[in-house]
């Protein structure tokens, strides 16, 4: 029997956005501003503004032409406890444990109780040790992607936008009674002999013992895809250039609720219709940006102004020890996120700062986040940019990260932007963007 349990949340998140066109801390991926601490409400270029703040779409200069982003992607993982490998290990240990039990015979136990039972006790110890290590452990991954075609115009600038973000979280729910049961086998020859004889004489073999093991692993994931048309126009308000934009969009969401015995967990089952549910609705992003002099821009954006709650599928698991059936379910929340930003810029340097005015919600079973970020870009050459920044979650649920990246713009027509991040608890990520200006 081979039950391979691949709990790599990187693979989960990446496979999600590859298969479904799918976050980062934000609901967008834009490599330049991701490298600048995840800012961009006031500092993004007009060609990427539709991904972040639709008002920035109206800030194109007379010499600016159509810009196409195809695509921008980013992925991030936090897995301090190496959960993806450890659950592989527990899967191997349960296989070893079952093999030992299935090979037991009453004759062997009676003829050589110490040798046979010692092997059984050793397998129980290894499995119990692994459960102790996994207790309370979690891992999470995020990914985002975006495409945009931005068309500047003096009357009304327009952009066609597709963007998506994915969030996946894996957690272990270790039943203390599993550990206690295995320790009783490990520490008592009498208990071990009794359990071994029970399994050896039963037609169900190891099932007689593994039915007493009821720990679970839970996987929650959501992918939110937006398909919209951004529109923006600039006005003169008392001598201050004020840009206003909006992006009405069709929004499709997939939510995944894969909960199973930790001993049978298989990440390839995540996409099964039994655990997947989707929902389609309408939403809208809005934004504004104002220029104060030649060097200062302030911005405000509201994303997903229409709140939507999507319930996951119900997953029922029966406890083999008590017979009690538990219903595992969750709700993914899409709610308005309002962010303010400011930027100071000249021909050589851009400094930016963003702060969320509202919390970012996700699954109801998880804590909310609220992000702030700062960043800088230096352009020593007209074809080279160097960026750095810092992003923090003031609510303390997500990890604080340092960001950095570079941008290349040969002939100012082809733009290649790369970014990376590193943070607390073995958090790391990377992103890339390719764009063309015609």
Image (cartoon, rainbow, N blue to C red):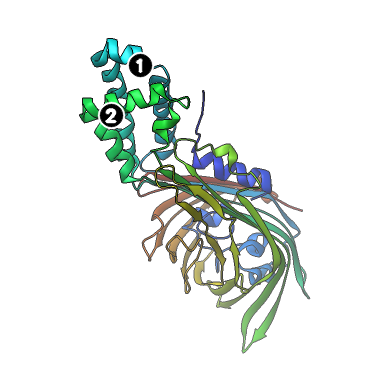
**Residue in the image at 61% along x and 45% along y:** 16
Q: Nearer the viewer, residue 194 or 136?
A: 194
Q: Quadrant of residue 158?
A: bottom right
Numbered badge on residue 168: none
Disc with the residue nearer the chain's start (2 vs 1): 1
Numbered badge on residue 106: 1
157 lies above or below 240 = above
**Residue in the image at 56% along x and 48% along y:** 74
Residue 388 appearing in the image:
yes
Q: In the rendering, at what x and y percent does residue 111 appear?
A: 28, 10
Q: Quadrant of residue 201?
A: top left
Q: CA distance from mark 2 to mark 1?
A: 22 Å
As drawn, the residue found furthest toward the bottom would be 238
Tag 2's secondary structure?
Answer: helix
Q: In the rendering, at what x and y percent does residue 379 appear?
A: 52, 53
Q: Nearer the viewer, residue 324 or 138?
A: 324
Q: Are marks 2 and 1 in contact (CB under 8 Å)?
A: no
192 lies above or below 55 = above
Q: Nearer the viewer, residue 403 or 270?
A: 270
Tag 1's secondary structure?
Answer: helix
181 sits to left or right of 5: left
Total labels drawn: 2
154 lies above or below 109 = below
Q: In the rendering, at what x and y percent does residue 293 appear?
A: 55, 77
| Mark 2 residue crowding within 10 angstroms, few (<14) / some (14–19) / many (20+) | many
Query: Residue under circle 2?
Result: 125
Q: In the rendering, at what x and y percent does residue 244 appear?
A: 66, 77
As drawn, the residue found furthest toward the top would be 111
209 lies above or below 80 = above
Residue 416 appearing in the image:
no
**Residue in the image at 43% along x and 62% along y:** 374
Q: Nearer the viewer, mark 2 or mark 1?
A: 1
């Amino acid at each position: 029997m081979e039950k391979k349990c691949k709990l790599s949340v990187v693979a989960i998140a990446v496979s999600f956005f590859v298969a479904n066109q799918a976050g980062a801390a934000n609901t967008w991926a834009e490599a330049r501003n991701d490298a600048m601490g995840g800012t961009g409400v006031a500092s993004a270029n007009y060609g990427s503004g539709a991904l972040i703040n639709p008002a920035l779409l109206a800030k194109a200069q007379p010499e600016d032409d159509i810009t196409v982003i195809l695509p921008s992607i980013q992925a991030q993982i936090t897995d301090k406890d190496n959960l993806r490998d450890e659950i592989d290990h527990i899967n191997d240990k349960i296989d070893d444990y079952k093999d030992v039990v299935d090979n037991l015979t009453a004759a062997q136990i009676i003829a050589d109780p110490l040798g046979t039972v010692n092997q059984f006790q050793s397998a129980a110890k290894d499995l119990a040790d692994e459960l102790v290590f996994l207790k309370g452990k979690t891992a999470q991954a995020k990914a985002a992607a975006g495409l945009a075609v931005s068309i500047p115009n003096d009357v009304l600038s327009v952009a066609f936008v597709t963007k998506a973000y994915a969030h996946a979280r894996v957690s272990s729910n270790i039943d203390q009674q599993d550990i206690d049961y295995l320790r009783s086998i490990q520490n008592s020859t009498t208990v071990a002999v009794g359990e071994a004889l029970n399994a050896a004489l039963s037609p169900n073999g190891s099932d007689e013992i593994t039915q007493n093991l009821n720990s679970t692993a839970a996987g929650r994931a959501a992918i939110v895809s937006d398909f919209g048309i951004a529109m923006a126009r600039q006005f003169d308000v008392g001598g201050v250039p004020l840009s206003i934009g909006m992006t009405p969009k069709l929004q499709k969401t997939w939510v995944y609720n894969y909960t199973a015995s930790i001993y049978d967990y298989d990440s390839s089952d995540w996409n099964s219709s039994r655990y997947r549910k989707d929902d389609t609705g309408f939403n809208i992003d809005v934004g504004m940006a104002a220029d104060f002099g030649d060097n200062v821009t302030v911005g405000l954006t509201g994303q997903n102004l229409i709140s939507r709650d999507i319930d996951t599928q119900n997953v029922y698991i029966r406890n083999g020890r008590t017979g009690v059936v538990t219903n595992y379910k969750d709700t993914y929340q899409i709610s308005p996120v309002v962010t303010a930003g400011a930027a100071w810029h000249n021909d050589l340097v851009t400094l930016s700062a963003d702060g969320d005015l509202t919390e970012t919600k996700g699954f109801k079973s998880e804590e909310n986040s609220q992000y702030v970020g700062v960043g800088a870009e230096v352009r020593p050459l007209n074809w080279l940019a160097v960026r750095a920044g810092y992003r923090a979650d003031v609510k303390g649920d997500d990890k604080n990260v340092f960001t950095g990246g570079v941008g290349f713009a040969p002939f100012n027509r082809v733009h290649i932007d790369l970014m990376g991040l590193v943070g607390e608890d073995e958090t790391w990520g990377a992103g890339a963007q390719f764009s063309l200006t015609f």
